[in-house]
Amino acid sequence: MQTTIKQTTMRAVRLAQPTPASMVTLCDAPIPEVKPGWVLVKVKAFGLNHSEQILRLNEIQADYISKPIIPGIECVGEIADPSDSAFRVGQKVAALMGGMGRSFNGSYAEYALLPTHHVFAVESALDWAEMAAIPESYFTAWGSLFECLALQANDVLLIRGATCALGYAALQIAKAIGCTVVATTHKESKLPLLAGADKALLDNGRLAASLPGVTKALELVGPKTLPDTLCCLEKGGIVCNTGILGGVYTLNGFDPIKDIPNGVYLTGFFSNYPTAETMRTIFRFLDERRLKPAVGAKFAFENIREACQALDSGSVNGKIVVTI
């Protein structure tokens, strides 16, 4: 059964050039036409992400971005038209990555046409805003912790750059399974936000030799502090580089022989390939433990400009969510 959508246009954000948050506006755009292998999702809410800021301020200039583009790498909503998929009209779903907001139009819109293989059925007791804080942040945290770090209850986990949505998610998951967590921030004012960690540290860029017993590390600051993080671990430890909050994107001059300590392992997590099984597991994990994501701020779609300004300022603690 397919739905009949009476309207032909929708509100959306469309980018064609570098756009500071103060210039973000809603415009009218045609509702996408459904095609085989794709489903039409009525967007209920979406989270904002650092990668969307990068796209909006700079990456939009790249030749591989077809312009204008609707940004947004994740959303939650309902199936408006299932096309040739097994979904049904009105079914609750989450979608993320796979090219959203870069290779094809993303979630900053009332409707999103998305490839079926990156849309996942969701069962959750959370409301739309809470659900919207989960897909990208929790999938990335989950993959980093379990697929890359093989995290266990007896681990001592260092989360470097923990006062971001991904950091909060990783901290929540790690504590839920019984880990000891050391979390850092580079802003003293944000130390109280890490009260859930066993130890909260102000990061001065040099932590090596001051953290005995660390067995796993989630590096969210990125190449800026990665060499130091590698030296924080016990022999046999693993570092997963997942974030680039430090604004340094490559390791220029990195010598893997000299810069990776003997017996320490380095890996990274790329969140472009979510699976239905993993997404089900994450939502079930949260529901069973009655955990809720840290929603730092909620904005109505009409206030998308203010939401983007909050993202760019770094003033919000937790996930920024926009509801439609």
Image: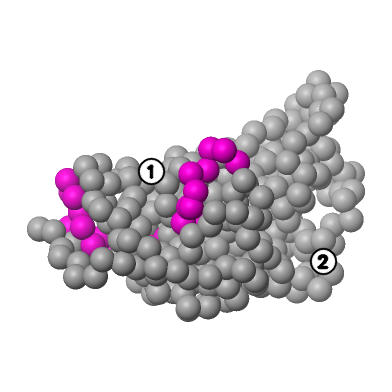
User: Where residue 256 sits: x, y (%)?
Assistant: 78, 24
Residue at the image point whose x is 37% and y is 63% from the top: 29
Left or right, 179 with respect to 214, comes to: left
Q: Is residue 65 magenta?
A: yes
Residue 215 located within the stretch drawn in magenta: no
In what quadrant of the picture does the N terminus appear?
bottom left
Residue occupied by mark 2: 187
What residue is shown at x 87% (from left), y 51% (from top)?
Answer: 205
Q: Mostly what secondary structure, the magenta segment?
A: loop
Q: Which residue is painted at 48% across and 52% down in the image?
A: 68
Residue range of the region highlighted in magenta in the rendering: 62-88
**Which quadrant of the figure has residue 290?**
bottom left
Q: Which numbered disc covers residue 298?
A: none
Q: Earlier in the sequence, mark 2 or mark 1?
A: 2
Which image quadrant: the C terminus? bottom left
**Residue sitting at the far left:** 1
Q: Amino acid at mark 2?
A: Lys
Count the marks. 2
Q: Mark 1 packing: few (<14 Cα in 10 Å), some, or many (20+)?
A: some
Q: CA distance from mark 2 to mark 1?
A: 35 Å
Q: Position of residue 25 (x, y in %)?
A: 53, 70
Seen at 32% across and 53% down, the residue is 113
124 relative to 98, above or below: below
Residue at numbered disc 1? 275
Q: Secondary structure at mark 2?
A: loop
Q: Position of residue 162 (x, y in %)?
A: 70, 59
Colour theme: one colour
* 242, 31: nearer the viewer: 31
